[in-house]
Amino acid sequence: MARMLKALLGVVLSAALALLSRSLFLHVWLTVALALGVLVGVVAAYKGRVWGYYVLGASAALFGVAAALGSGPWWFWALGAVTALPALAVSRPLLRADWPAALTALAIALTLGAGAAAAHHRLVHLPNIEAQLEGAPILCGHAYAHIMNETTL
């Protein structure tokens, strides 16, 4: 594995661990699951599994769309960009090897990531959602209102 690719995966690993620790501290369990997904993608990519890069691409799309829709804090933009770097680094060799399969897998990954962010945004912003999510800590931890206020700053 190239040194640059290892360095990029190390940066993504650091960002995912920071997100995981922050989310565990604030009890935002949906973001904990997302950070664990990024960690799985990093480990798979580090072991040479191509699907790990697609998991990172889907995560990057999810972070970007969540930030664009206002479902996540402003720094999700940076997290999405950092998470996309390893996938972009291996895109050229994957496209050379089998471009129809690579483009199809990329389209599926980006659609799943963006769709998940859009579905979460739609669910959270339903009318009277606070009363409906009162007992659902998986979707909103005790600090969820603080995080939503953080996105409007």
Image: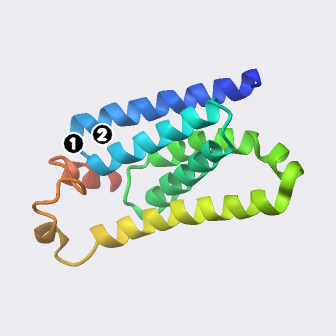
Task: Mark 1 and mark 2 in contact? Answer it, CB < 8 Å.
Answer: yes
Hey, which quadrant is residue 109 in on the image?
bottom right
Give the left or right position of residue 126, taking residue 132 as reference. Answer: right
Q: Amino acid at mark 1?
A: His
Where 10 sits versus 50, above or below? above
For the residue carrying disc 2, how many other residues have a C-alpha within 10 Å: few (<14), some (14-19), or many (20+)?
Answer: many
User: Looking at the rendered structure, which numbered label has been put on residue 27?
Assistant: 1
Give the left or right position of residue 139, taking residue 60 as reference. Answer: left
Where 5 sits versus 37, above or below? above
Give the left or right position of residue 44, taking residue 123 as reference. Answer: right
Q: Name the residue at 51% across, 48% down.
A: 77
- Label 2: which secondary element: helix
Q: Position of residue 98 (x, y in %)?
A: 85, 55
Q: Name the residue at 15% across, 67% down.
A: 130
Picture quarter with the N terminus: top right
Where 24 sits versus 6, above or below? below
Q: Position of residue 20 (x, y in %)?
A: 36, 35
Hey, which quadrant is residue 93 in on the image?
top right
* One can see residue 15 in this view: yes
Q: Amino acid at mark 2?
A: Ser
| Residue that mark 2 sits on | 23
The foreground one among 133 and 144 is 133
